[in-house]
Amino acid sequence: MRRNEPEQPAPKPAQSWRETSNQNTAFPSESQSENLGGTQSNRYQNPPQYRKSQSQQLPQYRSSSAPKNNPEEQQQRPYMNNMGAENPSGFVDHFRVPNAQESSYRDSYLNPTYTFETYIEGDCNRLARSASIAIARRPGETAFNPLVVYGGVGLGKTHLAQAVGNEVKRNDPSKFVLYVTSEQFTTQFIEALRNNNVQQFTNYYLQVDVLIVDDIQFLAKKEKTQENFFHIFNRLHQNGKQIIMTTDRPPRSLEGLTDRLLSRFKWGLTADIQKPDFETRIAIVKQKLMSEGVNVPDDVVEYLSYNIDSNIRELEGTLVSLLANASLMQKEIDLDMAKNALLNIVRNTEKEITIDFIQQIVSEYFGISVEELKSKTRKKDIAQARQIAMYFSKEYTKEPLKTIGNQFGGRDHSTVVHASKAVTKRTASDSLYNRILEELLDQMNIKSKG
């Protein structure tokens, strides 16, 4: 059953910027902005759908009753149209349905460097990346519609979402792919309300083949904006168009969004992106170095990857800073330079103990690889190291037993419990074993609970 579209107010004659600038109602008040679903702080932004004109004045929107041949209006608002010719009306309608030749109205606002080739796959993002690739090949035709990607800051959500858009455009340039943040969407909607252009605004979005909305959580408590997005979402989904959204938390944890909108998120796939493990971080650093055409010693790569373990953006930023310093000082990058770079960039806080961190320390101590630690082998030296790593993971991290078992080659939680009991029992009678544990704790900078 088709939902009735809300009635739009009758269009009002457009006013010139000079006319509106002398009125107190030129922009909504703070209370009005809140009612409209946004704030005044970003009213001067140039959202991506707004085509920039050569005029320095704020854009006006064409109303059906706007005067078309008013000399005074022409003189007040000099304006060049899309093709560079003079536009006597002086109005810019940003949301009308464009002609096929007006490709500028169909700009995608994608970062061309955000591709699948530059996105490193790991256990932390495998599901989200695989689903994104499937969508890019058949947008709107898979069960992953909408695709909701969630994860912490700097883990690559925006990169992955835009990689889908870039791949779709590469496969079919005629597709209209649009990337927009939720804040930009809100700003545009407020402008449309102010200028009685909500229908044109909606029509613009209904042309999109692939809609990518970043940071959807910022639509919280903006009721009218959510209502408009809800109708756009329904129409696009009904027409087989692809929708991709990113957020910083699972949809069930989002507050301030209406239940009916949240229910739409469940129609497709929700995939999370977790913190990258040590191996994935190394691969990210090496890929970045390759793109820059720079060779850096392996010990520097491992040092950076080991010490920055929670934020890919921070890891890449530190690497860029290190490369810039080396270039300015005309020196080769070495471990001392990397340590100095981290002192200036990374906050001096106590390091969080993670399973990856424990596995790395234990494997290095016993002279084995992390892969062997996770493997199915029952060799005595490897099994002993594995038990100790499981014990530390249980005692010094907040991860549940099931997660710990999965991190050790997909083992059951009962295996973790057995390993922990075995280590505890041996410490009661083996002083050499206790010394090994103390040395490992010292390397991890953990105070013994004993």
Image (cartoon, grey):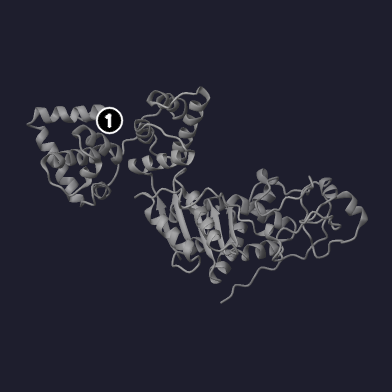
| 313 left or right of 195 in image | left
The residue lying at 25 percent from left, 39 percent from top is 359
Q: Is residue 277 visible to the viewer in this orientation of the structure?
A: no
Where is residue 415 drawn, in percent x and y? Answer: 17, 48
Which residue appears farthest toward the right when viewing the image?
A: 71
On-image quarter of the C terminus: top left
The residue lying at 40 percent from left, 32 percent from top is 296
On-image quarter of the N terminus: bottom right
Q: Nearer the viewer, residue 372 or 258?
A: 372
Q: Residues within 10 Å of mark 1 (few under 14, many from 20)?
A: some
Say which residue label 1 marks. Answer: 444
Vertical order, 353 against 83 (above or below): above
Circle 1 sits in a helix, a strand or a loop, which is it? loop
Which residue appears farthest toward the bottom when viewing the image?
A: 1
Vertical order, 308 against 120 (above or below): above
Vertical order, 86 against 235 (above or below): above
Where is residue 45 drawn, in percent x and y? Answer: 68, 46
The residue lying at 21 percent from left, 44 percent from top is 372
The amino acid sitting under disc 1 is: Met
The residue lying at 47 percent from left, 43 percent from top is 153
Q: Is residue 343 visible to the viewer in this orientation of the structure?
A: yes
